[in-house]
Image (cartoon, rainbow, N blue to C red):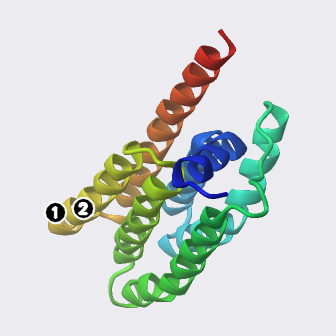
């Protein structure tokens, strides 16, 4: 791939603009909030961490079931950026867990910031400014939730709702663009 736009188009086509992953991630956040509400904050933390491992495989499976190929061209340099961003995110999770040792709800607010940073890289990977909006929304939510002293349930629920709504919007953009190309 010689041009950035070609690489971004390949990523967009291969992953449905990343929409399914965003939606699945939001669903994991919701399950985490429910675990916090019905069990304990610690169980909610573990639901988010363990569920996070399954976001990409589930998104790929769901994507394939609805006609998204779930892969990019092997020579696409943005594939490496996506993997590097994933590794960075994974390396930050112990920071969020460390925050939870002081105050449990800080885990969720810390994770919101980590995920926000991850989505900012998606703006380059997919060439879509909506990921700046998503990243800024999650980052702002983390700051506001911290500032008001929000409990873990509200923090996890907020992350889930922001991602699910964003995933639906991004998927609608993907479907709209596919219809335009097919016309």
Camera-nearest residue between 99 and 112: 112
The reply to whether the C-beta atoms of the residues labelled 2 and 1 are less than 8 Å apart is yes
> Residue placed at 42% from the left, 90% from the top?
98
Q: x, y (%) of residue 132? A: 34, 52
> Where on the picture, by quarter, is residue 106?
bottom left
> Residue placed at 54% from the left, 86% from the top?
91
Quadrant in the picture for the N terminus: bottom right
Q: Which mark is residue 145?
A: 2
60 up-or-down from 153: above or below: above
Q: Residues within 10 Å of mark 1 (few under 14, many from 20)?
A: few
26 up-or-down from 170: above or below: below
> Where on the picture, by quarter, is residue 84?
bottom right
Q: Secondary structure at mark 1?
A: loop
Farthest-out residue, left: 147
Camera-nearest residue between 142 and 18: 18
> Residue placed at 76% from the left, 37% from the top?
68
Distance between mark 2 and mark 1 Cα atoms? 5 Å
Quadrant in the picture for the C terminus: top right
> Where on the picture, by quarter, is residue 166?
top left
Q: x, y (%) of residue 58? A: 76, 52
Is any atom of residue 142 visible in this view? yes
Camera-nearest residue between 79 and 161: 79
Q: x, y (%) of residue 131? A: 41, 49
Farthest-out residue, front: 2
Q: Which mark is residue 148?
A: 1
Is any atom of residue 24 visible in this view? no
């Amino acid at each position: 791939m010689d041009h950035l736009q070609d690489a971004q188009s390949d990523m967009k086509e291969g992953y449905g603009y990343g929409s399914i992953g965003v939606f699945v991630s939001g669903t994991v956040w919701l399950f985490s909030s429910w675990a916090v509400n019905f069990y304990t904050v610690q169980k909610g933390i573990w639901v988010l961490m363990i569920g996070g491992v399954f976001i990409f495989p589930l998104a790929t499976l769901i994507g394939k079931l609805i006609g998204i190929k779930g892969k990019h061209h092997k020579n696409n340099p943005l594939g490496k950026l996506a993997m590097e961003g994933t590794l960075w995110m994974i390396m930050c999770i112990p920071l969020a867990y460390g925050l939870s040792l002081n105050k449990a709800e800080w885990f969720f607010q810390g994770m919101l910031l980590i995920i926000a940073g991850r989505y900012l890289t998606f703006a380059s990977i997919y060439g879509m400014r909506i990921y700046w909006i998503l990243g800024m929304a999650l980052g702002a939510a983390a700051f506001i939730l911290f500032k008001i002293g929000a409990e873990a349930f509200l923090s996890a629920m907020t992350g889930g709702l922001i991602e699910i709504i964003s995933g639906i919007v991004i998927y609608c953009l993907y479907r709209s663009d596919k219809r335009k190309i097919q016309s």
